Image (cartoon, grey):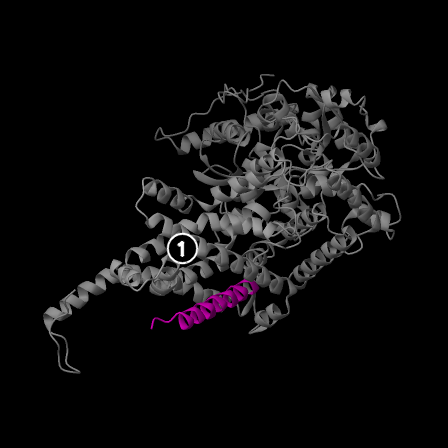
Amino acid sequence: MPVGPARRKGAWPSPSSRRALLTAGAFLAVPLAGLLIFRVGTIAQAAANSLYQYDLLSGQRVFTGAGNYLRAVHDAGFLQSLSVTFQYAAMKIGVQIPLALAIALLMQKSWRWASVVRTAVYLPVVTPFVVVATLWALMYNPTIGIIDALLRKVHVAPLNFLIDPRLALPSLTAVTIWKDLGFTALIFLAGLQGIPQGYYEAAQVDGAGHWRQFWSVTLPLLKRFTLFSLVIATINAFQVYTPVYVMTQGGPLARTEVATYYMYERAFLFYQMGYASALAIIVLLIILGLSAVYFRLLRPE
Amino acid sequence: MPKPTARNGKRSAPQPHATDQISRRRLLRNSIGAFLGFGISGYLLSDGSQPTVHAATAPWVDTTGPLEGAGREPVTLRFLDEAGSPWDEGHEAMITEFQRQYPSIKVQRNAMPFTELYRQIQTQVAASEPPDVLYIDGPAVASFAAENVLLPLNPYIPADDLHDFYPSSLEEATWGGKLYGLASEQSVPLLYYRLDAFEAAGIKPPDSLATAWTWPQAFEALKKVTKPDRYGLDLISGQYLLAGCLRSAGDPKAPKTSSAYKAWAGISPDGRTVVGYQDAPEVIRAMQLFQDMWKQNIMPSSPIPDAMPTGRAAAWLGAEWAEGKLVNKYASVKWSVTPAPYFHSPFVHNGSLAFTVSARTRHAKEAVLFARWMTSRSGERLWFQYNPQLPARRSVANTTDVYKRVPKSLDLQEFERESAPRIRIPIYTQYTALLNQTITNVSAGADVKTEMTAFASKVQTALDDFWSTHK
């Protein structure tokens, strides 16, 4: 949008510039107000709540200062939930990012079923998570689930995917990878389509094979897209809640009790809204910290 | 009595019973009250806008005494109800009849699935917008009452009317000596079993309370009906079914300081201690038996919808709602029923949801009137046509013929002789969530003693937190 000619430092903008600024401001006012009230405002409210012992039902508030934060540091349950969250995030990102890139490379090729594959990969993304989690919980059911039925066909004993403490978290992670894979693949696809063909032709002239082209051309030029995917996948991993709520309720033996579910329990089962707010702020800081590390490591050269 | 069919969803609107047993004096008083009430309102509304009242049916709850003036002004009540069948059709029909009898009161029903009810109430209370009337699970009444969310109902209900309710129905909705809720039905668990499975195994389960199985006996029988493609028993639910079984490992007649009594009581009489109660040795031994059943694939560790009627389990520990499902949805399944097994003392949990009134309602009299009307004798009879479960009023249960015959006679006997409400604990959601987590862990093979001790300790911590802020 034009904002008028350059003006002297300290001078008022010209009437036409002022009009343009007002128009821009008017357009931005509504989304900005929404952002301030529903994003920044709620985070600020949570930060304020975290300084109180605050009972949701009775509304009782007692100022405790940093008490909730000190409690969190010594809360074995919260520390365990953070550990579960990191394990979950590592598994999810470790599998999802390479797999999404591989699928994007497949989708990039011009072949007959490319559009069908793209739709199939993206379909889980637009399916509500509650539906996905419910369906997978049924599929994982050792008695009526299709997965164990197939295993029985090949004479493999049924697996208690969501009950066995060793399998519960990987099983849950597989569902979220399946759900989010399409989104990450689509980001990589956009990145791949933005790489000029000339780079590959130059590499071929230099004698580079497919593998060498991938390492020396594709991957470096996808750095920004990889960074974006990593940041989004990390944030999503730390926000995971729905599949835990629907499929495992944090169990068995708290092996799927991620930090958000632990927060939910403190807030809505134990009514400890102040403490839950402190945990939310801690998780927010962790996500911000990790994002900063990613940006630092993958800074475009 | 006409029975609505559950399948086609089309029910002829049942007519309310006009045969309440009321004394002549009360009838006269009601008639005079109604005559004067309608006469005065007719006079006051002489612009021709007075509501049409069907003279054929007298109002089921009189609006004299503490409820005097209820419904005099137009009022809209917000009612938070459970969603699904039979509440959708049953409560809607009852609301229609209520509004016909009290035309100035409009009831706005908002229904939520059972699992969402609690959260919905929390949210609305936290937002200072609670509904006027809330349909709450029995043990949760204590929890909300402890937070001053609910209105005590005693001042609004004549003592002679309360005497008609089964005492345990009132006990479940009482906190701090005050009554906060009225139930329209009750329930107790029974063991429903497939005749084909048990006959093939040559097992004839007991058919009377006197000969009821103990859990070790049931274990042996269930082991015999368990097959590679069929579990012996479907038992999933936590605080109502399984916790009741665990309490039967205790003894209500033992000295109050003994672990046997504590195992049965579940919580100390002052409501402040659960350590030593929830993890009493008797409870741990009982839980061990359930873990053995999970380990031996007698019970599924993941829920299976309708496991027993679909043949994936031979037996089902359920209540009358299970019977309703068997009758309406699985009519071809041949089944029978045996009393719920027990460990040491014949004991089961009873309970139901209750109509409660928000402490913040601006229409207290109308809200109480609605709660009382829904749980009146005629209200319970009407409700029974949609939901054939044990009525919460003795007078209705005793005059409902089906409770004189098996299987419902067993429900009534078990309820009257062997049942008590679930423990009353002000941190009901925490208790339930922690119990469910513990059950999941035990079913996954965790050490029973460690789990039960940790469970009691966590509930105790939450309880201590509660009492530290609620003097």
Picture quadrant of residue B192: top right
Q: Residue at x 87, y 51 (%)?
A: B258
Of residue B276 and residue A154, the one placed in the foreground of this image is: A154
Of residue A301 and residue B26, the one placed in the foreground of this image is: A301
Note whether A44 is above or below A183 in the view shown.
below
Note whether B42 is above or below A160 in the view shown.
above
Q: Is residue B384 visible?
A: yes
| A286 in magenta | yes
- Which secondary structure lies at badge 1? helix
Q: Is residue B360 visible?
A: no
Note whether A191 is above or below A15 in the view shown.
above
Q: Position of residue A94 (x, y in %)?
A: 50, 58
Q: Position of residue A34 (x, y in %)?
A: 34, 59
Q: What residue did someone put label 1 on?
A: A101
Note whether A226 is above or below B262 in the view shown.
below
Residue extending furthest toward the bottom: A9
- Residue stretch in magenta: A275-301
Q: Amino acid at mark 1?
A: Leu
| Label 1: chain letter | A
The secondary structure that most of the magenta stretch takes on is helix
Of residue B383 and residue B300, the one placed in the foreground of this image is: B300
Taking A15 as reference, is B374 left or right?
right
Crowd rating for badge 1 (residues with CA inside 10 Å; few <14, some 14–19, many 20+): many
